[in-house]
């Protein structure tokens, strides 16, 4: 009982007024890290003890920092040795623990850092409080449910806590004699069983990229543009109804390079902006820096260009066989001599 009464003795501050910063998030983001732009957010890892929250969080921190994106991992044990060392594990103390961490995460995020919070945080209302604190000030918040089963967590039992809880030595242990409320609608759900840490990290990085937190260049997953077997009949049917142009063997080979993801992050033949970046800087500069010294473009004749004027999509054929569909095409000057040089 001694542990659970600490939080009730804390006095609320009065006569406190929030001060507004003179530096905007945009200005702060431009000088923080090497990628530029404001990327502050909080990623909240929740799950049972031993699920892999901190392992994934620290691996993600290392991954992002190595790519010039400032990040910092806040771990439950680390925080309880300092900021929250006066809190126990009774429900009210757990609530105060999460409230404090949520406020700290919000400050990190507001500074432009990606805050990585790894806490069991067993109660939905506490996690929703953390989300609302960020929502109120317009900061992105991502809940990551590390859904490793209780059986697997007990099997790992790296710290020997489950063994002690089962023996009655530890009281109020989440999953044993205190409940864990499964997240209702997390942004990411990760089951770590039979998966590598790197694979789990990439799953989160992809979500961050989709939400413009990290640039496309930070995602290592190959972009496969090929049509699945299940969707192939429908794609062929569509291709046969569209205007088409015949391509050369070399063009078809480049098409295969793009389709199989060998030119990731390209998702098609280069647009003019990408082509000029490649020619003059030997890399793609939009959404991060990606080495790309070889231009991958599709030259077509003036006759074909005029035929396709106004088309939003058309089919590429090789020896009369439909091979791909080009959508939202952009036509620009060939600059053949410049490309060949």
Image (cartoon, rainbow, N blue to C red):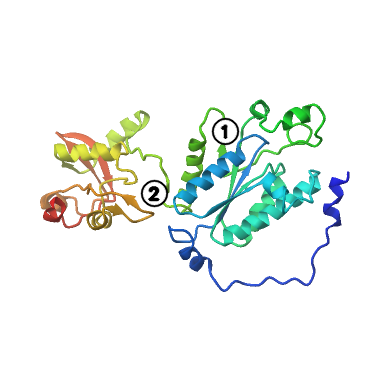
Left or right side of 300 for 141: right
Left or right side of 151 for 326: left
Residue 170 drawn above or below residue 340: above
Q: Residue at x 37, y 39 (%)?
A: 222
Ranked by sequence position, the earlier of labels 2 and 1 is 1
Residue highlighted by disc 1:
191
Residue highlighted by disc 2:
217
Q: Nearer the viewer, residue 50 or 265?
A: 50
Is the C-beta separation of discs 2 and 1 under 8 Å?
Answer: no
Q: Nearer the viewer, residue 229 or 279?
A: 279
Q: Position of residue 152 (x, y in %)?
A: 64, 27
Crowd rating for badge 2 (residues with CA inside 10 Å; few <14, some 14–19, many 20+): some
Residue 171 drawn above or below residue 72: above
> Where does the N terminus fall, quadrant-wise?
top right
Q: Residue at x 24, y 49 (%)?
A: 293
> What is the number of the mark on residue 63?
none
Instruction: Kindly give the residue lying farthest to the front in the view shown.
Output: 81
Q: Position of residue 276 (x, y in %)?
A: 24, 57
Left or right side of 334 for 237: right
Instruction: Kindly give the residue lying farthest to the right in the view shown.
Output: 1
The answer to which image quadrant residue 123 occupies is top right
Q: Residue at x 21, y 48 (%)?
A: 297
Q: Residue at x 66, y 25 (%)?
A: 155
- Is there any visible trace of residue 207 in the rendered image? no
Pair 2/1: label in front: 2
């Amino acid at each position: 009982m001694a542990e659970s009464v600490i939080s009730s003795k804390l006095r609320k501050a009065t006569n406190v007024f929030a001060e507004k910063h003179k530096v905007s998030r945009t200005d702060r983001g431009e000088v923080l890290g090497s990628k530029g732009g404001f990327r502050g957010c909080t990623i909240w890892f929740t799950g049972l003890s031993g699920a892999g929250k901190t392992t994934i969080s620290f691996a993600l921190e290392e991954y992002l920092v190595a790519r010039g994106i400032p990040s910092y991992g806040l771990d439950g044990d680390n925080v309880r040795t300092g900021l929250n060392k006066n809190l126990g594990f009774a429900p009210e103390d757990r609530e105060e623990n999460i409230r404090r961490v949520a406020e700290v995460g919000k400050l990190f995020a507001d500074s432009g850092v990606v805050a990585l919070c790894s806490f069991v945080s067993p109660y939905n209302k506490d996690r929703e409080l953390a989300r609302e604190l960020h929502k109120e000030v317009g900061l992105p918040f991502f809940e990551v449910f590390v859904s490793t089963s209780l059986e697997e967590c007990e099997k790992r039992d790296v710290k020997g806590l489950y063994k002690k809880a089962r023996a009655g030595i530890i009281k109020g242990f989440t999953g044993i004699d205190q409940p864990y409320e499964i997240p209702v609608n997390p942004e990411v759900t990760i089951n770590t069983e039979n998966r590598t840490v790197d694979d789990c990290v990439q799953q989160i990085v992809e979500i961050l990229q989709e939400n413009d937190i990290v640039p496309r260049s930070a995602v290592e997953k190959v972009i496969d543009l090929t049509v699945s077997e299940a969707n192939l009949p429908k794609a062929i049917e569509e291709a046969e109804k569209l205007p088409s142009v015949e391509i050369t063997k070399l063009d078809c080979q480049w098409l295969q390079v793009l389709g199989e993801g060998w030119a990731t992050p390209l998702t098609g033949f280069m647009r003019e902006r990408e082509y000029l970046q490649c020619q003059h800087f030997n890399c793609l500069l939009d959404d991060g820096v990606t080495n790309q010294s070889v231009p991958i473009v599709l030259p077509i004749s003036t006759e074909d260009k005029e035929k396709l004027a106004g088309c939003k999509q058309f089919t590429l054929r090789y020896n009369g066989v439909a091979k791909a569909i080009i959508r939202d095409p952009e036509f620009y000057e060939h600059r053949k001599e410049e490309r060949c040089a």
